[in-house]
Amino acid sequence: MVVLLANRANLQARRLHERIATRLRGSCETVWRRRAEPGEPGPYRVVGEVTPRRFLGIDAYPTDDARIEIGFRLETEVEYEHYWCTWIEPDRGLAVGWHQDGSHEELGSVHLQLDSGDTVIERQAATFIDAHPLAVVARRLPSLGGVVQGVTWEDGEPVGIEIAGEIDR
């Protein structure tokens, strides 16, 4: 008997995102996998809610709520997966993280992006990691705190990213 699985690539994507959720459970208070919303690339997002002070290992931070969202699109026109690994603070309208999505080729295949609301504040070239998606998450997640702390502010608005020290950009 032959069993045909419909949308086999989607099953692989689901399994990958479930494994990413398992990886985030050590760093986040609550973790879930959701389907990507219309306009979001890729089939799924893994969302982890964090307490910024705890995640960043600092005593004071201007907001109590943040989340990490990670998503991969495995089937692309290029030889590598597209991904998004982003820190989001809904109360302040802040989003900062890595995008490997085939846009902004002038910056290379991956860039670090800072958004305030619907406005892109800054994009910087970032290191391409030629590895399995779980290895990419394992390298990006420890660097995320340094990126978040590198966001510079003026008059309550994010204006750029200044990363000091050795952070895997």
Image: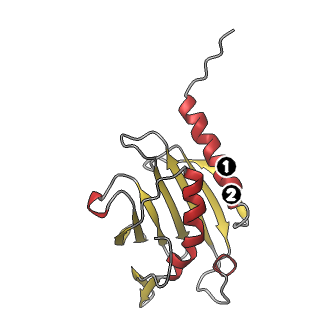
Question: Callout 2, which amino acid?
Answer: Arg
What residue lies at 55% left-to-right and 75% top-to-bottom?
Answer: 91
Q: How is the image coloured?
A: secondary structure
Question: Callout 1, which amino acid?
Answer: Arg
41 relative to 63, above or below: above
What residue lies at 65% left-to-right and 62% top-to-bottom?
Answer: 48
Question: What is the number of the mark on residue 23?
Answer: 2
Left/right of residue 133 with respect to residue 124 in the rendered view: right
Q: Could you tell me which secondary element the residue under label 1 belongs to?
A: helix
Q: Residue furthest left?
A: 106
Q: Residue furthest top?
A: 1
Residue 107 or residue 31, whichever sits in front: 107
Coordinates of residue 35 in the picture (x, y in percent): 57, 45
Coordinates of residue 65 in the picture (x, y in percent): 63, 74
Q: Quadrant of residue 23?
A: bottom right
Residue of label 1: 19
Q: Is residue 90 visible?
A: no
155 relative to 142, above or below: below
Is label 1 in contact with label 2 (beta carbons under 8 Å)? yes
What residue lies at 28% left-to-right and 57% top-to-bottom?
Answer: 105
What residue lies at 52% left-to-right and 61% top-to-bottom?
Answer: 85
30 relative to 134, above or below: below
Q: Is residue 86 visible?
A: yes
